């Protein structure tokens, strides 16, 4: 399985385009995973299996990846940022802080 790049390295190339869908060239099954969690999990067989199951069970991966693309774009434009203090959160969720921009409007 091809290994993911940290989100910091994914930001620039994704700014103006959609992430590759499952089955397409360049698809990164770990693209939703926090880079710190990824560093701990990328070679864990159970985590690899869980990531594969996540994408297999996603009925609308294009919508999932559209949301992730919006998050990455917001990070690129400085509308959100990584937290400066530790938070207790799920390994599967990239925790970002809003910098005052209402992404729902």
Image (tube, grey):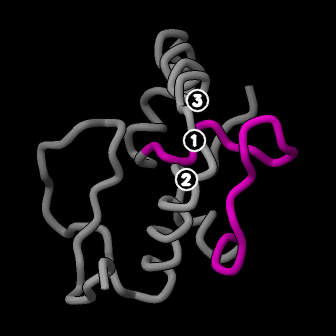
Q: As drawn, is 97 to the left or to the right of 81? A: left
Mark before the other along the chain sequence, 3 or 1: 3
- The structure residue drawn at horizontal position 54% and vertical position 18%, both measured from the top left corner, is 53
Q: Earlier in the sequence, mark 3 or mark 2?
A: 3
CA neighbours of label 1 inside 10 A, class few (<14), some (14 to 19), many (20+): few
Q: Are marks 1 and 2 in contact (CB under 8 Å)?
A: yes
Is 13 in the magenta? no
Residue assigned mark 3: 55
Residue at point 51%, 81% (across, down): 76
Residue 56, placed above or below residue 96 = above
Residue occupying image coordinates x 39% and y 38%: 37
Towards the viewer: 73 or 104: 104
Residue 77, given in percent of the width and then of the height, sits at 47, 88
Residue identifier under label 2: 63
Q: Main secondary structure of the magenta part?
A: loop
Q: Residue 60, which numbered label?
A: 1
Q: Magenta residues, as a range? A: 14-33
Closer to the camera: disc 3 or disc 1?
1
Indicate whether residue 21 is drawn in magenta: yes
What mark, if any, has residue 99 been given in the picture?
A: none
Q: Quarter holding the N terminus?
A: top right
């Amino acid at each position: 399985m091809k290994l993911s790049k940290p989100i910091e390295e994914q930001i620039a190339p994704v700014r103006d385009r959609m992430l590759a869908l499952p089955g397409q060239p360049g698809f990164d099954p770990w693209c939703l995973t926090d880079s710190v969690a990824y560093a701990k999990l990328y070679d864990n067989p159970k985590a690899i299996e869980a990531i594969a199951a996540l994408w297999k069970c996603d009925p609308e991966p294009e919508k999932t990846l559209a949301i992730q693309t919006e998050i990455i774009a917001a990070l690129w434009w400085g509308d959100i940022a990584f937290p400066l203090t530790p938070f207790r959160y799920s390994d599967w969720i990239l925790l970002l802080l809003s910098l005052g921009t209402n992404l729902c409007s």
